Amino acid sequence: MYPIELKNVSKSFPSAGKGSGELLILDNINLAIEDGVSTAIIGKSGSGKSTLLQIAGGLDAPSSGSVICSGTDFATLNDREKSFHRNSHIGFIFQANLLLEDFNALENVLMPSLIAGVKEKDCRERALKLLKKTGLEDRINHYPSQLSGGEKQRVSICRALMNNPSVILADEPTGALDEENASQIENLLLSLAKAEKKSLLLVTHNNDFAQKCDRVYLLTNRNLTLIKDSK
């Protein structure tokens, strides 16, 4: 059983203009994300990388094919069940960190567990441990507006790991950062994923970042091609 498996996944969108048909973005994609393996997908802007990641995370549905998350086909779940399953098995990191501005760093990290119905006293220790691992132990009471871009992404990484998911999905997690901060976040994300024995599926324009992963796929002409495999 894989944390994430895509089977014969295709995705199309209506083309602009009446009677224009459909635009095929992904064509019969097969991809298995293995336990503890870091996987990167690279490709040009508009190639469908983010669409593929959203489908892998159950945030969007394929036009055909299936997405299996920790043994469960997303298509068999209603919206509420799908949200619960995602929260339990997948951690998300986005280029726009999507932190809640009215909550401090600690509260943002705690949020996935609180949504899952865990009492704060039962999950606070893990949140504090994660923030300490990312060097934010002195920033736990700071709000997003008081944090730098790199610090916000560190909080996002902690939040993604909070519920001990089997896989982390990251969409251009360093795309909005300067070179120095980007390098720090890249290394932090990969080291934490390895330390916590999590699978990682990353989409990025940054080939240097991608090459730090165990496997690298190129998405082009609506299909995936494996270009690196160190596992």
Image (cartoon, rainbow, N blue to C red):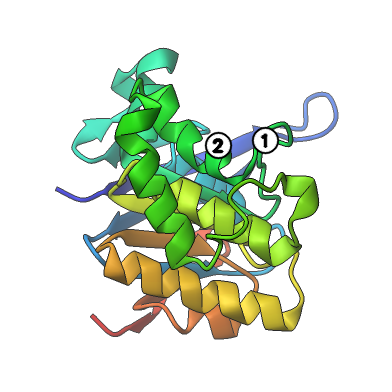
The image quadrant that residue 115 belongs to is top left
Towards the viewer: 109 or 31: 109
- Counting from the top left corner in percent of width and height, residue 208 is at 57, 85
Quarter placement of the C terminus: bottom left
From the viewer's perspective, is residue 77 above or below residue 64? above
Query: Type of residue at label 2?
Result: Glu
Residue beneath disc 1:
100
Q: Which residue sits at x=83%, y=24%?
A: 18
Q: Residue furthest right?
A: 17
Which is closer to the viewer, label 2 or label 1? 2
Towards the viewer: 22 or 43: 43
2 or 1: tag closer to the N-terminus: 1
Q: Which residue sits at x=39%, y=74%?
A: 191
- Counting from the top left corner in percent of width and height, residue 189 is at 47, 68
Q: Is residue 209 left or right of residue 85?
A: right
Q: Residue furthest left?
A: 1
Query: Type of residue at label 1?
Result: Leu
- Give SS at disc 2: helix
